Amino acid sequence: MTEFISERLEINAQAEEVFDFLADFTNFEHLMPEQIKNWKADADTCSFNIEGLADLSMRIASKNRARNIHIVAHGKNPVDYTLDVFLFPADETSCKAEVIFNADLNPFIKAMASRPLQNFVDMLADRLQQHFK
């Protein structure tokens, strides 16, 4: 598995509030880049198309209240992957968040996809931070 880790960013909300937002996939649409098309979600699953690349679907596999959300590939996907968001309480009004994406990439795909996947986790963390400004 190849791991992509975002910077740990400060979020202007308590870990519980951020957790509640992330625990429902219908909220993730606000975090997705413009290249995401055909977004469909319910509380625990989502599917979408990355314009010009692939159809993906995922589901929330586990939730640890105010600490992390563990998301896994669901259904037919071009690669096996996991997406984790970890929350770290900072004080009464803020927390820190870190996004980690692990993917089972062959060397050819890894060479092509590493930069976009790193950009993706960085963008998710940035948009989460912006959402709670």
Image (cartoon, helix red, strand yellow):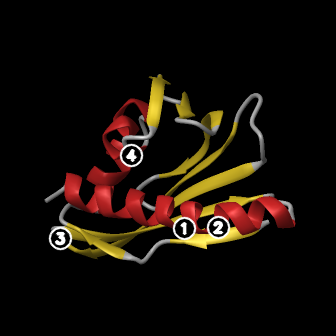
Dot placed on the residue nearer the N-terminal end, 4 or 1: 4
Is residue 86 in sight in this rendering? Answer: no
Q: Are marks 1 and 2 in contact (CB under 8 Å)?
A: yes
- Residue furthest right in the image: 106
State the residue at coordinates (78%, 48%).
80
| Res 60 quadrant in image | top right
Q: Which mark is residue 59?
A: none
User: Residue 67, image x and y in percent?
Assistant: 46, 62
Q: Are marks 2 and 4 in contact (CB under 8 Å)?
A: no
Q: Which residue is mark 3?
A: 92
User: Residue 7, image x and y in percent?
Assistant: 42, 77
> For the residue marked with disc 3, what is the amino acid?
Glu
User: Residue 122, image x and y in percent?
Assistant: 43, 66
Q: CA distance from mark 4 to mark 1?
A: 13 Å
Disc 1 element: helix
Q: Which residue is mark 2?
A: 114
Disc 3 element: loop
> For the residue marked with disc 4, what is the amino acid?
Pro
Q: Which residue is mark 1?
A: 118
Q: CA distance from mark 3 to mark 2?
A: 36 Å
Q: Which residue is mark 4?
A: 33
Disc 4 element: loop
State the residue at coordinates (65%, 36%).
54
